[in-house]
């Protein structure tokens, strides 16, 4: 049993490493190999919430508005976000992701898609169906 667990660990470790390499490739393509996890978290939060204002982002992240302003300024300098004035109220600004920001916010999903593509290329249809059936049992 222990040998099986070690073998599974090795296989899953390899898959996780593949995903990490794909993520690093995406970050490298964006010229952002040194982006922080906190910055990625903010980009994901903006991406998930759509129409996000500074006040709303402060509320979602449970941070102060000055903290949000500082983070958005950093992300703006990295060309990941921009401010868009509200057409109805010029005092309100929406925080929007640039294409670069979207790529980073969705890097993990895109990396996972790349790993899945590698799996699909390596397996035949029967093996893919078998893998799906096995993984569905995991809860």
Image (spheres, grey):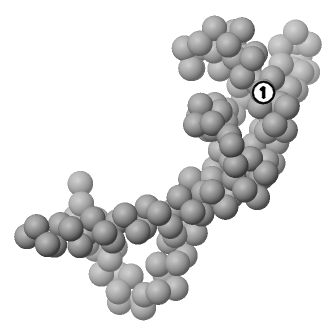
Mark 1 surroundings within 10 Å by alpha-carbon count, few (fewer than 14), some (14 through 19), many (20 or more): some
In the picture, residue 94 is in which quadrant? top right
Query: Which residue sits at x=67%, y=61%?
Result: 25
Q: Secondary structure at mark 1?
A: helix
Q: Quadrant of the C terminus?
A: bottom left
Image coordinates of residue 122 in percent, x first then y, are: 47, 86
105 lies left or right of 127:
right
Q: Nearer the viewer, residue 6 or 64?
A: 6
Image coordinates of residue 19 in percent, x first then y, are: 51, 62
Q: Nearer the viewer, residue 137 or 118?
A: 118
Query: Which residue sits at x=52%, y=85%?
Result: 121
In the picture, residue 137 is in which quadrant? bottom left
Q: Quadrant of the N terminus?
A: bottom left
Res. 56 in view: no
Query: Which residue sits at x=63%, y=8%?
Result: 64
Res. 65 in view: yes
119 lies left or right of 81:
left
Q: How many marks?
A: 1
In the picture, residue 83 is in which quadrant? top right
Residue that lies at the very extreme toward the front in this rendered image: 34
109 lies left or right of 68:
left
Per the image, the residue denoted by label 1 is 74
Is 117 located above or below residue 43 in the figure? below
Query: Which residue sits at x=27%, y=65%?
Result: 9
Image coordinates of residue 27 in percent, x first then y, are: 69, 53
Residue that lies at the very extreme toward the left in this rendered image: 1
Image coordinates of residue 93 in percent, x first then y, are: 83, 19
3 lies left or right of 78:
left
Is 59 located above or below residue 82 in the figure? above
């Amino acid at each position: 049993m222990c040998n099986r667990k070690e073998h599974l660990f090795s296989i899953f470790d390899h898959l996780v490493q593949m995903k990490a390499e794909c993520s690093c490739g995406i970050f490298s393509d964006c010229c952002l190999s040194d982006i922080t996890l906190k910055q990625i978290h903010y980009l994901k939060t903006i991406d998930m919430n759509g129409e996000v204002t500074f006040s709303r982002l402060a509320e979602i992240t449970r941070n102060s508005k000055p903290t949000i302003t500082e983070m958005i300024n950093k992300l703006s300098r990295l060309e990941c976000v921009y401010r868009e004035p509200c057409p109805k109220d010029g005092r309100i600004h929406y925080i929007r992701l640039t294409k670069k920001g979207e790529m980073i916010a969705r890097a993990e999903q895109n990396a996972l898609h790349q790993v899945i593509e590698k799996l699909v290329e390596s397996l035949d249809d029967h093996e893919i169906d078998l893998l799906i059936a096995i993984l569905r049992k995991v809860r």
